Amino acid sequence: MLLTAHSMTQHTLPTDKKAFIFDLDGVLVDTATFHYQAWKRLANSLGFDFTWQQNEKLKGVSRQQSLEYLLDWGNVDLPSTEKQRLAARKNDWYLELVAGMTHWDVLPGAFRLLRAAQAKGIRTALGSASKNAQLILAHTRTAECFDAVIDGNSVSRSKPHPEVFLNAARALDVPVSDCLVFEDAQAGIEAAIAAGMQVVGIGHPADLKGADMVVPGLVDLTL
Ligand code: B16
Ligand code: MG
C-alpha cells in the first residue's frame, strides 16, 4: 500500500495496531529546521556551505554521524577531539533555538492523534535518535503523552539500525508486527522496516522510499 496524500485528504490508519511509535524531530515538532540552521552555522564557520538537500540526509542520523557527513561534504579532516568540540558547539547553537519552544510548537494533528490512540487503548512510544528528546518533551509539555520514551541516550546504534524501535516495542510489551511507526526520515523508514514494523512516512514520497503510506503531516491522518 503506497498512498500519496494531499493535505486536504484524510487517510485512515490501520485499525489492527496495538502500539504507535513516533519519531520526534520532523514528526511531532519542527526541530528539523533548527538542526538545519545549527549545522549550516557550523559549516559556514568552517568556510563552506550546507544545503537543505544535504540536511535531508542528516534527518534521523545521530549527531556524531551527522558531523562526519558534514565534514566529508566540506572536505575537512580533523582529529577526534576537535570533532567532539564541533559537535558540542553545534548542539549549543541548536539548544539556543530549542529554548524558545513551547506547547504551541507541537505540529498540527499530533495531540489529536495521540489522544485518539489512547482512547482506543493503543500504546504510544517515542522513538527518537535525539539526545535532546527529553528536553523537547519538557518544553512542549508532551512527556505525559507517551507510555515509553526511547531516545538517543538509550540506544547504542542509530537509525537505520532498528534498535530504537525494537527497544520501544519491548518497553511497551507489544510484538513488532503490532507496532506502527511514524517517521519523517529515510533512515527512520529503513529502521522501522528492519524492525519488522509498518511505517507511515511524514513528508514527501520521494524522500521516504519503502514507507507503507506517505502523508504530508499527522494532521492528514484519522484513526
Ligand atoms: P541530537 P529524530 C534526530 O531526531 C534528528 O532527525 C537528527 O537530525 C539529529 O541529528 C538526531 O536526532 C540527533 O539529535 O543532536 O539532538 O541528539 O528525528 O530521530 O527524532
Ligand atoms: Mg525525524
Image (spheres, rainbow, N blue to C red):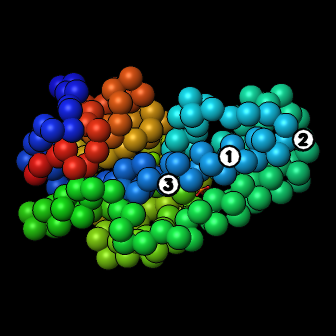
Circle 1 sits on which residue?
Answer: 39
Asked whether mark 3 and ligand 1 are closer than 8 Å, the reply comes as yes
Contact (CB < 8 A) between labels 1 and 3? Answer: no
Classify mark 1: residues with Cα within 10 Å, few (<14), some (14-19) or many (20+).
many
Relative to residue 9, is residue 65 drawn left or right? right
Circle 2 sits on which residue?
Answer: 78
Q: Secondary structure at mark 2?
A: loop
Circle 3 sits on which residue?
Answer: 31
Classify mark 2: residues with Cα within 10 Å, few (<14), some (14-19) or many (20+).
few
Contact (CB < 8 A) between labels 2 and 3? Answer: no
Q: Position of residue 204 (x, y in %)?
A: 35, 30
Instruction: Give the amino acid type for the residue marked by disc 3 in the picture.
Output: Thr
Asked whether mark 2 and ligand 1 are closer than 8 Å, the reply comes as no
Q: Nearer the viewer, residue 29 or 57?
A: 29
Q: Quadrant of residue 99?
A: bottom right
User: Distance between the Cα atoms at labels 2 and 1?
Assistant: 17 Å
- The relative height of residue 133 versus residue 159 in the rendered view (above or below) is below
- The residue sitting at 29% across, 38% down in the picture is 216
Observer-side mark, 2 or 1, equals: 1
